[in-house]
Amino acid sequence: MTETIEHAVDERTYAAWSRPLWWRVVMTREFAMIALLGIVYAWATGNVDNFDNPLTLYYLFLDVAPILMIALPMTLVIITGGIDLSVASVMGLSSVLLGIFHVDLGMSLPVAALFAIAAGVLCGCFNGFLVGYVGLPPLAVTIGSLALFRGIAVGLLGTEAITDFPDRWSDLARERIVEGSSYPVVLAPIVVLIVAFALLLHYSPFGRGIYEIGLNEQAARFSGVDVQRTKLILYALSGAVAAFAGIYYTLRYGSARGDNAEYLELQIVAAVLLGGVSIFGGRGALHGVIAGVLLIGVLQSALRLESVSSNVINIVIGVLLVLSVISTSFLSWVSGLRATRRRSPAGAARPDGSPGDRGPTNPAG
């Protein structure tokens, strides 16, 4: 009798997945974004003059590099149901601190960069403490810190700019991996960051805790996830990567200013949401976000080559952002509707009160 029960328990009587593998891979928002990126890139290559020039691809990578860096930790933050709007201000602050530490205080550039990144970590911990431990809304906290960090950056330098950076460091920020290729050196640290964040999010218990927090914070807490510490770590990572992006931004343009990277946070959030990350938390994957960043970069490059003004480009990106948010809600509504219909028994009344599809009805009641 006992063997019969154990055999019945061990033997699976249902499929491991409700859908085949190809369906689960292809029918996703992430795959749709990758397909859209391929379509837009192919269209731009065939219809926009000079888009297929290696120089265009080179500058495309240089332009999207800071967005791609910060989009990685931003993805994790948004999956928890939070947001960090202060990242561009942290970039500006790290840019100013790099200039002050290196030029005014005489530190070597690597040491100055380490201090600037440490300042970024402190900024992130400030946000993470208020969001995780104090329990304040992430939107309100990071809007406030956006103004705070930008104000400190502008207050330290005013309208001045520090430009006395060594040429070899500025050249390194713009250098190609192989002379004449379209791939700048900055892609190397980006690849390292992508691998690190992919392992953290998709292949670690810490990453599973991030999804649990986004789906149901209270349930995640009861299941053993340290919600406060997780949020503090994520915002600290966001600040560290934003500071690193600010250093790259400064060296690429050879100028440390308080208004560097102003309003860049809008493009970062747009790219993350375009990549299929739900603004309500609990859903998202890094490969979709990378496709979203590259899609924005390809669109901007193609439209600039077509002499489209920056205002129109911003309108196009804004429309894409709104559509991505609406599509998430719409797809969730359709999925919920289909699930409700599948669960409805034959002949049972539907949620709207109408009779079911199957089974005869008796007009006489």
Image (cartoon, rainbow, N blue to C red):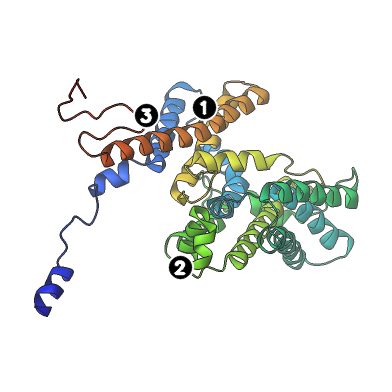
Q: Residue 32, labelled with which disc?
A: none
Residue 339 visible in the current orientation: yes
Asked if the residue at tag 3 contacts the one at tag 2, i.e. Cβ–Cβ closer than 8 Å, the answer is: no
Instruction: Give the x, y percent position of residue 146.
Output: 76, 47
Give the secondary structure at mark 2. helix
Q: Residue at 43% across / 60% down in the picture?
A: 202
> Which amino acid, mark 3?
Asp
- Does 322 sit above or below residue 149? above
> Which amino acid, mark 2?
Pro
Instruction: Give the x, y percent position of residue 318.
Output: 60, 29
Give the secondary structure at mark 3. loop
In this rendering, which labeled residue sits more in front, label 1 or label 2? 2
Q: Earlier in the sequence, mark 2 or mark 3?
A: 2
Instruction: Give the x, y percent position of residue 347.
Output: 21, 33
- From the viewer's perspective, tell me whether residue 317 is left or right of residue 115: left
Q: Kindly identify which residue carries mark 3.
A: 352
Q: Earlier in the sequence, mark 3 or mark 1?
A: 1
- From the viewer's perspective, tell me whether residue 202 is left or right of residue 20: right
Q: Residue at 85% across / 52% down in the picture?
A: 152
Q: Residue 50, labelled with which disc?
A: 1
Q: Kindly identify which residue carries mark 2.
A: 205
- From the viewer's perspective, tell me whether residue 312 is left or right of residue 196: right
> Which amino acid, mark 1?
Asn
Q: Residue at 56% across / 69% down in the picture?
A: 226
Asked if the residue at tag 2 contacts the one at tag 1, i.e. Cβ–Cβ closer than 8 Å, the answer is: no
